[in-house]
Image (spheres, rainbow, N blue to C red):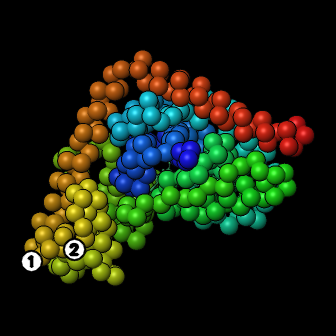
């Protein structure tokens, strides 16, 4: 009974939000014992939006440090930077030729992102899900821990892999999304019907992993709720539901326990408690991150060794696909 493979990636497009953390990063280290885990900072994906080169380089390194600070152990998991492994771009090209224009046109993230950047609707943005499929399929991943927003991209990866296998035989393992029960969809603190995103114009809408305690507290105190006064999880209370969910994950308390704790108390007390609990949960991540960033040699060692191992695994899958195609 061989261990199953886990693959996931995150873009170096700025400091991750509490949504990235609760929906993805926080869960990654938890899988290290049970699975063979491969995690990547997917810098090629970030090029779909204009990046300033020095800034991209800094953010990539910073994200490696943050993932380690979240608990990824390079002795147990493989951690690497996507562009260091050429097979990602290479397999993406092959898979592009097995992906239909129509199916990519239906991707809701493409529609959202092209509406947000109407001046730069590039082919990379359109083909983004194919690169993501290549990322996953190269490592023969069984499970892909992602937030709920990635469900549609995961379906596409499965479809493309199945189509390729259908023609050429078993080249790719068909991956399953692994969406957390809690935290899969952390919402904006200002418009709780929208997902929390660092590209939101309003910085009060999101918590960044490196926000200090005062900033975190201030943003939660300003969180949009409703005109009632009851801390209960109920249909139509998007703001409160989101805060209860966040509080429940970071404290480990169940939703009924949270409701009980705040029965008869106002939203003010509750928001303060959520802010304090989140600040406390993120404090060790922030502290470890600061220490790691001082040790650039160690970080370089981690991602260099990670890339070597990743190139070996990815190279095998890519060679297999090439052979089947007559390349
Ligand atoms: P972003 O979506 O912030 O640009 P990525 O695309 O790099 O960042 O996503 C990294 C991971 O974070 C993915 O697994 C994604 O599903 C997850 N994620 C992003 N936003 C949220 C959110 N608001 N709630 C839960 N998970 C999220
Ligand atoms: Na995303």
How far is mark 2 from mark 1, CA to CA? Answer: 14 Å
Residue occupying the far right of the picture: 326
Please name the residue that numbered disc 2 is placed on. 256
Q: Quick check: marks 2 and 1 in contact, CB under 8 Å?
A: no
Q: Nearer the viewer, residue 325 or 247?
A: 325
- Tell me the SS state at disc 2: helix
Q: Residues within 10 Å of mark 2 (few under 14, many from 20)?
A: few
The disc label shown at residue 264, or none = 1
| Residue displayed at 74% across by 58% down | 162
Quarter residue 135 falls in: top right
Q: Nearer the viewer, mark 2 or mark 1?
A: 2
- Tell me: 224 left or right of 108: left
- Tell me: 16 left or right of 247: right
| Residue displayed at 41% across by 20% down | 298
| Residue displayed at 56% across by 47% down | 1
- Tell me the SS state at disc 1: loop
Q: Which quadrant does the C terminus fall into?
A: top right
Q: Position of residue 45 (x, y in %)?
A: 60, 44
The disc label shown at residue 177, or none = none
Q: Position of residue 30 (x, y in %)?
A: 38, 47
The answer, for residue 283, to whether it is visible in the render is yes
Q: Nearer the viewer, residue 233 or 38?
A: 38
Q: Position of residue 40 (x, y in %)?
A: 53, 39
| Residue displayed at 72% across by 44% down | 92
The answer, for residue 267, to whether it is visible in the render is no
Q: Position of residue 136 (x, y in %)?
A: 62, 47
Report whether the residue tagged 1 is closer than 8 Å to ligand 1.
no
Q: Earlier in the sequence, mark 2 or mark 1?
A: 2
Report whether the residue tagged 2 is closer than 8 Å to ligand 1.
no
306 in relation to 175, above or below: above
Q: Nearer the viewer, residue 182 or 175?
A: 175
Count of numbered tags: 2
């Amino acid at each position: 009974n061989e261990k199953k493979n886990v693959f996931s990636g995150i873009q170096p497009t700025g400091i991750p939000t509490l949504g990235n953390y609760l929906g993805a990063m926080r869960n990654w280290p938890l899988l290290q014992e049970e699975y063979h885990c491969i995690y990547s900072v997917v810098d090629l994906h970030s090029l779909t939006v204009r990046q300033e080169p020095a800034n991209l380089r800094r953010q990539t390194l910073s994200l490696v440090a943050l993932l380690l600070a979240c608990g990824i152990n390079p002795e147990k998991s493989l951690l690497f930077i996507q562009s260091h492994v050429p097979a990602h771009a290479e397999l993406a090209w092959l898979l592009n030729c097995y992906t239909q224009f129509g199916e990519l046109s239906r991707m809701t993230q493409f529609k959202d992102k092209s509406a947000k950047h109407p001046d730069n609707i590039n082919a990379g943005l359109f083909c983004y899900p194919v690169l993501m499929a290549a990322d996953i399929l190269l490592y023969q991943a069984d499970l892909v821990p992602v937030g709920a927003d990635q469900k549609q991209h995961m379906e596409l990866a499965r479809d493309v892999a199945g189509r390729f296998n259908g023609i050429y035989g078993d080249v790719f393992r068909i991956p399953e999304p692994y969406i957390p029960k809690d935290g899969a969809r952390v919402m904006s603190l200002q418009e709780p019907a929208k997902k929390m995103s660092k590209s939101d114009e309003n910085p009060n809408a999101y918590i960044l992993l490196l926000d200090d305690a005062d900033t975190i507290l201030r943003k939660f105190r300003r969180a949009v709720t409703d005109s009632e006064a009851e801390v209960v999880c109920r249909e139509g209370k998007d703001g409160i539901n989101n805060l209860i969910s966040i509080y429940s994950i970071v404290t480990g308390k169940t939703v009924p326990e949270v409701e009980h704790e705040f029965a008869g108390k106002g939203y003010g007390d509750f928001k303060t408690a959520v802010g304090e609990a989140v600040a406390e949960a993120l404090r060790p991540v922030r502290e470890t991150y600061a220490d790691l960033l001082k040790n650039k040699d160690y970080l370089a060692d981690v991602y260099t060794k990670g890339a070597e191992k990743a190139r070996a695994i990815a190279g095998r899958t890519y060679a297999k696909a090439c052979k089947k195609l007559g390349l």
